């Protein structure tokens, strides 16, 4: 199990002899593509809101933030990912 002080991953069971090294890849559900996509999406909709003053667009601009909060607080075991890397 990996942790960063607050978030815990799903347990990963390794059934290999202890003599062989095992390479693990530790990742995050919010990768760079998701993060930049959310920033661009939010910025675009915030600009549309400032021009039109249409409040439904303001709600749409916050969807990436709500998605990230959902992943962090309601699905914390899926936030940190662990995988075995091939040699």
Image: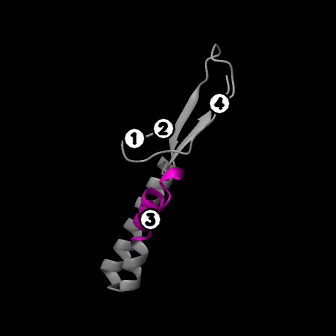
- The secondary structure type at the circle numbered 2 is loop
Q: Disc 1 on helix, strand or loop?
A: loop
Q: Do the residues labelled 3 and 4 touch (CB within 8 Å)?
A: no
Q: Within 10 Å of the Cα at label 3, are there few (<14), some (14-19), or many (20+) other Cα atoms?
A: some
Q: In this view, does 74 lie to the left or right of 52?
A: right
Which sits earlier in the primary sequence, circle 2 or circle 3? Answer: 2
Which element type, helix, strand or loop, lies under badge 3?
helix
x and y percentages locating residue 8 in the rendered image: 46, 45
Q: Where, by quadrant of the figure, is residue 22 drawn?
A: top right
Circle 4 residue: 14
Horizontal and vertical percent position of residue 57? 40, 80
The residue beneath circle 3 is 64
Residue at screen point 40% across, 60% down: 39
Q: Position of residue 67 (x, y in %)?
A: 46, 64
Asked whether the beta carbons under mark 2 and mark 4 sit within 8 Å of each other, the answer is: no
Q: How crowded is mark 4: few (under 14 residues within 10 Å), some or many (20 or more)?
A: few
| Residue 66, picture quadrant | bottom left
In the image, taking residue 49 as reference, residue 25 lies left or right, namely right
> Mark 2 = which residue?
2
Region rendered in magenta: 62-78
Residue 23: x %, y % from top left: 59, 25
In this view, 7 is above or below 41 = above
């Amino acid at each position: 199990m990996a942790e960063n002080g607050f978030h815990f991953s799903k347990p990963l069971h390794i059934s290999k002899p202890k003599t062989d090294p095992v390479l693990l890849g530790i990742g995050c559900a919010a990768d760079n593509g998701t993060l930049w996509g959310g920033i661009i999406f939010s910025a675009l909709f915030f600009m549309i809101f400032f021009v039109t003053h249409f409040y439904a667009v303001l709600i749409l601009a916050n969807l990436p933030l709500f998605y990230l909060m959902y992943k962090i607080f309601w699905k914390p075991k899926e936030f940190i990912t662990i995988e075995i890397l091939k040699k």
